[in-house]
Structures are given as structure tokens and as C-alpha cells.
Image (cartoon, rainbow, N blue to C red):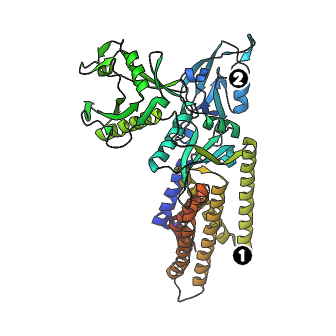
Amino acid sequence: MGRVKRLLTNWRILILLVSILFALIVINPNPWNKGVTIRFVDRNSSASQSGMVGADPALMPMSKEKIIAINNKAVEDTDGYYAALGELRPNKTVSLKTNKASYLLTARPLVENSSVIGVEDLGITVYNAPTSNIRKGLDLEGGTRILLEPADPVSASDFDTLIEIMKQRLNVYGLSDVTVREAKDISGKRYIIIEMAGVSEEEMKGVIAKQGKFEARIGNETAFSGSEVTYVCRSAECSGIDPNVGCGQVQTGEWSCRFRFSIALSQEAAKHQAELTSGLSIATDTTGSEEYLDKNLDLYLDDQLVDSLRIGADLKGREVTDIQISGPGFGGDQKSAVYASLANMKKLQTLLITGSLPVKLNIVKTDTVSPTLGRRFTKNAITVAIAALAMVVLVLLLVYRKLSLSLPILLTGLIEFFITLGFYTLLGMNLDMAAIAGLITAIGSGIDDQIVITDEIMKGSFKRFASWRDSIKSAFYIIIGGYLTTLAAMIPLLFAGAGLLKGFAVTTIIGITVGTFITRPAYAVFMEISS
């Protein structure tokens, strides 16, 4: 009992226990999770019109909305979901229950040659509900990854704009559960990586190849299109928080800031806008301090309304090529309101130039894995992990011939694996085959270090002049040296291969860091107290 108390009151053991609890909370394992999680919601579909939206890629997998019942019939997996869809009838109301809300949809008739041949798809793409917060990469889940590079050299600002345009375009198509990120190689060359689970290479290329059509409409008439916007200011000189209005407190606990930026229209667009606004009436806002025209300037991307702006009364009937766009942003304090205002400004700026990319993009590489192959990879990875674990157990038993020595080494390795996975999950990165290889590398290195600690302790027990502390100190000199060497080797891999080896490097770095500063010290304390 005294040894247990000494273990549970040692600060190194306490750090280990807290780390295990942290990993458990982050990973949130639930192997009995039922239902189907929503991946995409097609725009203008029955589901979209009922208020359903696609998954937010920033959410943890277990926090995403999942369908648990259709017409009061429980849905446990994708097979049950599609079986329930097969029972739907045209023009009938569909009751759909999720873990967050309930929806009423209409099953639209599927018409071919003026005849109803069935029920149109509800417009929801789903997958089996996840059993943890671990994000599976394309290798394990299936999907498509495309690596893009600009055809011509671009500035850092234009490159950021490219990424924002791709995000805006994919979001408008209803593809919210998609990753768009920047990557660099060792030489500093920049790429765009787009990853989308559950779609084929042809579907992905079709979305990327589409040229976004931007239109600004007044009523039902097009005022100007994307090609007629000749300039959008994104520099500090003509964009940012409006200095004439600034920020102010709307009410207790709510602030508002107004942004502004300039755009330039072609002469023909300015003339057409003047014609459309000449017949509009002037109205005032609720405070009576500002005058606007009675119709808004509606902004459409691929015929989808994405924003609406008021038109200042001073623009009525005037051919103006230089226009100032302004709008608000709200927040609980002034700082939050400033961030919200600038975010809204960036969204509008991106929207106004979405019709044409600043530079042509070339497809460098595509990787496609079918969901079936992804499941096979997952099973193979589990099989390899179990086989590796069995080999480690066998070797430890052959070397030490004592379960009291072999079991703590193995258990510490498993704990290290779990904590590493927790930190990796917290970063929101996808677990792919490269990341799994990094995990195995880190855990292998960890078990090797624990063997070093065990050997040093055993040597010390046979030498009267060597204390436990000296033995452990000797072991940690070796461990720290190995840690720094591995860390130095992994840093270049963070940028190698346009970031495609990043998972391997990150899991290895997390693994050896967790091992060196959390599990190794705890293991050493355990061995000292228990021996």
C-alpha cells in the first residue's frame, strides 16, 4: 500500500495520469456510436431548403451533426439510411431527426419523360458515424487529394487570395467538409492541397475546373459581373476599418465596427448601374441618419445569393467607376467586433474577385483511394500494429524472462501511443498511413529508451557504488541525446514533399516529446519505487 501511495503522490506519475485523462477527453472514444454523419448537403436540395447544412470541417468528428432517425425509424448505419430512403414516396413529407435538431423535408418526385419514376435524392451525403475524434486521412477513409501549383510566380497576397477563392467556391457548391490548405517544399515553393473525402477524382476535378460566375444584381437585373470589376483594393491605404465611422458600442455587451474598401468598375458597368438606380426611391435607415436606395445590391456566385449590400443614395443615377463598399461587424467587445468586421470585408473582397482566379492553377498530382480500399488499409494497419506488438512482447520475454520487467515496458509503450494520439487529434490533423508510420517509429524509439532505463537500473542494482539516481541519470543522458538527434532529423520532413510527409514528422515529434518528458520519467519512477 505504501508503494501505491508513493506512486500516486509523485509529480511525474501525476503528470502521466493527467495526460492520459487529457487524451481520453480529446479522442472521446465511443465504439458503440450509431447513426450516419452528414458530410455534404447539396444546394437547392430538399435538405438544403429545410435548413440543413454540410459539416463544418473545423468541428471534431464526434461533434458533427448525425442523422439518427427517418420517419421515426432508427438509422444505425449507411445501409439503414439508404434502406429508409428506399421507402420514401413522391411529394410526401419526410421527418428527419438528428442529434442536434429535427427537420421536415419534402420528397421530390424524380421525373423522366414527363413520368414520375421515383423519388429524387434528398441531397445529403452521409457516412457511418465516427467512433472517436480521430480524423481519418484519405488513405484510411477514401477520397481524393489534389496538389495544385500556380502556373506563374505569384505574390504572397495573391497566393492567399487563391486559397480563399477556392474555399469560397467549394463552400458555395455545398462541399463544406473539405480541406483547402497551403503546403511548401524544402525549396520554399508553395502549393495548394485540396482534400475531399468520399468523392472521385473526376468529381473533384470537375468542381475545381469550374469557372466561378459572379454577378451583382439590383432586383432581377444584373448590374455588373465579375469580369467588369477591374480592381478590388486589399491594401491598408484603401481598405480596413472606416476611419470616419470606426467602432462603437451598440448596447451593453455588443460592439459594432464598420469596414470599407474601394473597387473599380468598367465604364460600361458604371453606365448600366446608373440606369438601374435612376428609377429607385430613397429610404432612410431606422436611425434616420443614413439614406439608401430602396433596393439592395445582391451578390451572387454561380446563381447562389451569398450577400446583400445597401446602395447609398448618392449613387442614384450616377455613372461612378470608383465605388466604396462598406459594412458592419459585431462582437461582444471592441476587439471581437474589429475581427468580425475585417473577416466580413475579406469575404466580400474574395467574392468580388472569385469570378476569375489571379493566376492559372496546374494540377501537379492526384491521389484517389476508394472507400473500400480505405477500409482495407485500416484493417491492414490494425493487423500490422497487433503483429508488431506481439513481436515486441516476444522479444521482451526472451530478453528479460520476467513478466514483472516486460509488462511495464509494454504498458508504458501503449500509454505513450494513446497520449501521442491525443495530442495529434487535438491538432486537427488527419491520421494517414504516413502518420501511422510516425507513430510506430516514435513508440519503437520509446520502448528502446525504456529498455535502456531498465538495463541501467539493473546494472546499478549489482553495483554497490552506483545509486538508483545515478543509473537513471546515465540512462537519460542517452535518451536526451537520441531525442535531440531525432528531432533535428524530423524538422526538414515537415516541409518535404509539399507537406505530404508532414503527418509522419508531426507524429514522430509528438511521440518522442511525450516519451522523453512524460512517459520515460514516470516509467523510471515506477521502476525505482516498485523494485
Q: Earlier in the sequence, mark 2 or mark 1?
A: 2
Secondary structure, mark 1, is helix
In this view, the residue farthest toward the bottom is 465
Q: Nearer the viewer, residue 366 or 225?
A: 225
Q: Residue at x 60, y 83 (%)?
A: 459
Q: Amino acid at mark 1?
A: Val
Q: Is residue 337 above or below residue 86?
A: below
User: Is 119 left or right of 352, judged from the image as shown?
Assistant: right
- Of the 4 image quadrants, the one containing the C terminus is bottom right
Q: Quadrant of residue 101?
A: top right
Q: Residue at x 75, y 68 (%)?
A: 394
Work out how far the residue at label 2 is from the one at label 1, CA to CA, in angstroms: 59 Å
Q: Nearer the viewer, residue 301 or 12?
A: 301
Q: Amino acid at mark 2?
A: Leu
User: Is 304 left or right of 270, judged from the image as shown?
Assistant: right
Task: Residue 529: tell me if it is visible.
Answer: no
Q: Nearer the viewer, residue 269 or 237?
A: 269
**Disc on res. 85:** 2
